[in-house]
Image (cartoon, rainbow, N blue to C red):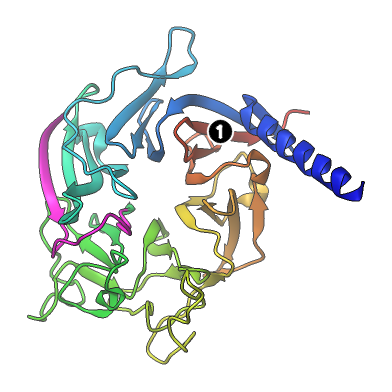
Amino acid sequence: MIDLIIFIMKYVLAFLVWMLASVPSVQAAGYRIETVVAGLVHPWSLTFLPGGGMLVTERPGRLRVVESGPDGRLQLRAEPVAGVPPVLARGQAGLFDVVLDPDFVNNRHLLLSFAHGTPEANHLRVVRARFDGRQLQDVQAIFTSQPAKADTQHFGARIAWLSDGTVLFGMGDGNLERTDAQRLHTHLGKLLRIRPDGSVPEDNPFVKRTDARPEIYSIGHRNPQGVVVVDGVPFAHEHGARGGDELNRIQPGANYGWPITTGGVDYTYARITPYRRLSGIEPPLVEWTPSIAPAGLAWYDGAMFPAWRGSLLVAALVERSVRRVPMAKGVAGQQEVLFKELGERIRDVRAGPDGAIYLLTDSPDGRVLRVVPATP
């Protein structure tokens, strides 16, 4: 009888979680979660357009527009943006990040990152294009990772603008030869920095070394899927294996350890390395073991949630949450786990220009969600 009661309780709990994830609005203590649009196929990234609306990438290779409808409410435009380059969409590969040029209002430029090539020989590619409201024009490849890698895992691909107008983005280790993250002849397992035209800044840390790829900014990364710049300082997080997810403050030329230091173990439970810390390797600001699978990363300093100002927001796929990490003088404070009542894999988190928090749910029927203060 006790086993039957436990089974019924588990079934009821699962049903309630499903119900909460299905309704258009969920209210919890202090906030309410609204569905902005639904019907997206594995959305990966979003960015806000001047004057309202947004662009959203779908991993299969589509760039979508969310715009005001006849009733003034946001809706998903039926036709994807034309002119998106061919994308390798298999496994973890696909269309990834979209970011606007800081001078987008005048030049209409944006950047896209995506998997390029074949399953047997593929690259991370970053392109610059001009968006005229309907299609991409003047598409120019400004970066293609080298050398080509096999398999379709660990692309990294998040992009952020640095305060000097250069572009910082992550490249995963490919999940084949892990020690490539420590080798300078390859882009794998690195953070990379270029100018928006694809040229290499003269002050990149390894630019004068003949044995190094000049775009390399930092090394020792496993799969960095979140990058954000706060007051000129870049922060990035990355997936560990079974544990060992990290949040790092990024310094040029620094080594962040993978795979010679990590707090995690392999998926087989085999030990990857005996070292969690080593001299000459930057320790993480925050480490998550067990893994939360960090995806998007945002800085919140908006007016809607005053208690959350000065916090990094970390989307978590496995934990199905957003981690709020308050920051004070570069030091991470006590974390808060948010939005678990959705029961959804959260792929991206963004702080909107209106002060709300926006989420992307990673599923074949993905949604854009908006978090606002709870109504009385």
Q: Residue at x 39, y 20 (%)?
A: 67
Q: Image height check: is 210 above or below 369?
A: below
Q: Image height check: is 187 above or below 296?
A: below
**Res 369 quadrant in image:** top right
Residue at which label 1 appears: 370
Amino acid, disc 1 = Arg
Say few, some or many: other residues with alpha carbon within 10 Å of mark 1 (under 14 / 14 to 19 / 20 or more). Answer: many
133 on left or right of 270: left
Please name whichever residue, 224 or 123, is drawn nearer the observer in this view of the structure: 123
278 on left or right of 79: right
Outermost residue on the left side: it is 210
Q: Image height check: is 198 above or below 356?
A: below
Outermost residue on the bottom side: it is 279
Residue 29 is at least partly visible in this image: no
Q: Residue 323 placed where, x, y %?
A: 59, 55
- Based on the picture, tell me whether residue 85 belongs to the magenta stretch: no
349 on left or right of 171: right
- Image quadrant where one finds the C terminus: top right
- Based on the picture, tell me whether residue 137 belongs to the magenta stretch: yes
Outermost residue on the front side: it is 1
Outermost residue on the right side: it is 1
Q: Residue at x 20, y 25 (%)?
A: 82
Magenta residues (range): 136-157
Q: Residue 134 placed where, x, y %?
A: 23, 21
Q: Residue 293 placed where, x, y %?
A: 50, 58
Q: Residue at x 33, y 40 (%)?
A: 59
